[in-house]
Image (cartoon, rainbow, N blue to C red):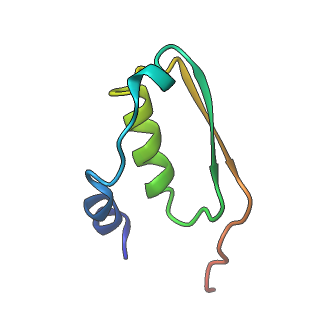
């Protein structure tokens, strides 16, 4: 899927527990970084609804681009 379609699919896919995230610095692990859509959706949610102070991202792999 392209980035816009991924964003559409991920809308509403995650929820946060404000008690666990509010004013905290959080580290998000993503096992596969492809378009960045999942990482962006989770980060937006943690910063907005979750009221996180900061969000950091660690990815372990990146897909190859077909040349």
Where residue 33 appears, as percent x and y from the top left, is 60, 62
What is the quadrant of residue 18 in the picture?
Answer: top left
Tell me where residue 63 sits by quadrant. Answer: bottom right
- Seen in the picture, residue 4 relative to 27 is either above or below; the reply is below
Look at the image and tell me in which quarter the C terminus lies.
Answer: bottom right
| Residue 65 locus on image (x, y percent) | 62, 78
For residue 17, what is the image quadrant? top left
Looking at the figure, which quarter contains the N terminus?
A: bottom left
Q: Residue furthest top?
A: 23
Q: Which residue shows up at 32% across the image and 54% down it?
A: 13
Q: Residue at 37% across / 36% down in the picture?
A: 45
Taking 41 as reference, is 4 left or right? Answer: left
Single out the residue that lies furthest toward the bottom: 67
Residue positioned 47% across, 38% down in the render: 43
Number of marks in picture: 0
In-image side of 8 versus 21 (left or right): left
> Residue 21: x percent and y percent?
49, 24
Q: Residue at x 56, y 23 (%)?
A: 54
Q: Position of residue 50 (x, y in %)?
A: 40, 26
Note whether 29 is above or below 63 in the view shown.
above
């Amino acid at each position: 899927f392209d980035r816009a379609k991924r964003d559409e699919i991920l809308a509403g896919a995650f929820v946060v527990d404000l008690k666990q995230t509010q004013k905290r610095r959080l580290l998000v692990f993503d096992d596969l970084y492809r378009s960045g859509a999942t990482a962006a959706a989770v980060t937006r949610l943690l910063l907005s609804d979750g009221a996180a102070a900061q969000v950091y991202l660690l990815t372990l792999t990146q897909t190859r681009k077909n040349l």
